[in-house]
Amino acid sequence: MNTILESLEQFWHYTGFANVSWLNLVMILVGIGFITLAIWKKWEPLLLIPIGFGMIIGNIPMFPGLGIGIYEDGSVLNTLYQGVKQGWYPPLIFLGIGAMTDFSALISQPRLMLIGAVAQLGIFGAYLLGLTMGFDPNQAGAIGIIGGADGPTAIFLSSKLAPDLMGAIAVSAYSYMALVPLIQRPVMLLLTTKKERLIRMPSPRRVQQKEKILFPIIGFLLTAFIVPSALPLLGMLFFGNLLKESGVTRRLAVTASGPFVDTVTILVGLTVGASTQADKFLTGESVKIFGLGLASFIIATACGVLFVKFWNLFLRGDRKINPLIGNAGVSAVPESARVSQMVGLEFDPNNHLLMHAMGPNVAGVIGSAVAAGILLSFLG
């Protein structure tokens, strides 16, 4: 009888009920919240469902030393997490993004690249704020990249500069990507007048296939020579785009933009979510990171809109740019461009801005990778 009781007592010590803390329950509820928003609101379900379920997995309380936790060397989760920790997954995602992206809007209106460049000021603004809040330069740089609204870039840079903060930075970046419509719309309305929102831009010119093929080659050479440290991201982005536009590697482009990138996205979301164990995630630093990430995102959006307003002072006639596309300079493709379109249609149902907003939006993808390379060059 005593043996049975001792066995039951030992079993009890190994259950989650015996090891649970209220912090675990909080994180499990947050994970359920992510899943609920993804299904109910349809906010970035491809990201929030894997991250949300990963949070639940990572916060199941367990007896230490079983060799199954994400932070325990040799465990399955830990092995999968190495793709995040070592920065393997982000370049692979960029390959898929390149194979999915049509750069025609940017090629037809290259001037819109400036909007994508200016929007990256949010990254450096948050970097300075991070320094004032007590983070060291590496940590501040990794946190600032959240303003690019690019989860893979945030993972890549934080894995190099601040691996101890990577979980909070990654979750923050992906969360704000999902909340793009809620965050950007009020900023856009605050900074623009009704007259500015009604500006109509002429249709962009038709881009030839030769230009589409040359763009990834020339674009890669220019950006890689400026910031070689961003080579893993830029190289895979432009390579994926060349697979798409060359016209002779359709099978590779379809694989890269479909099953391949979907598989990596699942692994990234699940392991990033699982890395948010309550004892490592629910800290004062995490709260600061989410606050700085939000500030970075708002600054990036505001800089894009205000830059277009300033630029319009020097433009005449149909050369003027609708400042509602200024928000699209961040790297959330195509969510930010869709926000430009939706807000524009609210004030003029016949003013379609999507084709124009995609220009700075894809420029933002390049710009966030370049900004990450710059930070890595100075801080790495």
Image (cartoon, helix red, strand yellow):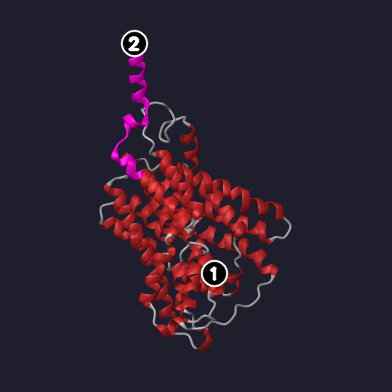
Quadrant where the image shows the N terminus: top left
Mark 2 crowd level (few <14, some 14–19, many ≥20, 10 Å Cα)? few
Mark 1 crowd level (few <14, some 14–19, many ≥20, 10 Å Cα)? many
Which is more N-terminal, label 2 or label 1? 2
The answer to whether one can see residue 88 in this image is no
Q: Is residue 284 left or right of residue 365?
A: left
The question of residue 6 being in magenta is answered with yes
Task: Tell me which amino acid carries mark 2.
Answer: Met
Q: Position of residue 284 (x, y in %)?
A: 27, 48
Q: Residue furthest front?
A: 1
Q: Position of residue 304 (x, y in %)?
A: 42, 71
Q: Position of residue 50 (x, y in %)?
A: 48, 47
Q: Is residue 70 left or right of residue 362?
A: left
Where, by quadrant of the figure, is residue 179 drawn? bottom left
Magenta residues, as a range?
A: 1-27
Q: What residue sits right under mark 1 in the picture?
A: 358
Q: Position of residue 11 (x, y in %)?
A: 37, 22
- Residue sitting at x 74%, y 57%: 248
Image mark for residue 199: none
The vertical placement of 296 against 190, above or below, is above
The question of residue 312 being in magenta is answered with no
- Residue sitting at x 65%, y 58%: 242
The vertical placement of 107 against 40, above or below, is below
Q: Secondary structure at mark 1?
A: helix
The vertical placement of 131 against 31, above or below, is below
Where, by quadrant of the figure, is residue 56 drawn? top left
Q: Nearer the viewer, residue 18 or 171?
A: 18
Q: What residue sits right under mark 2 in the picture?
A: 1
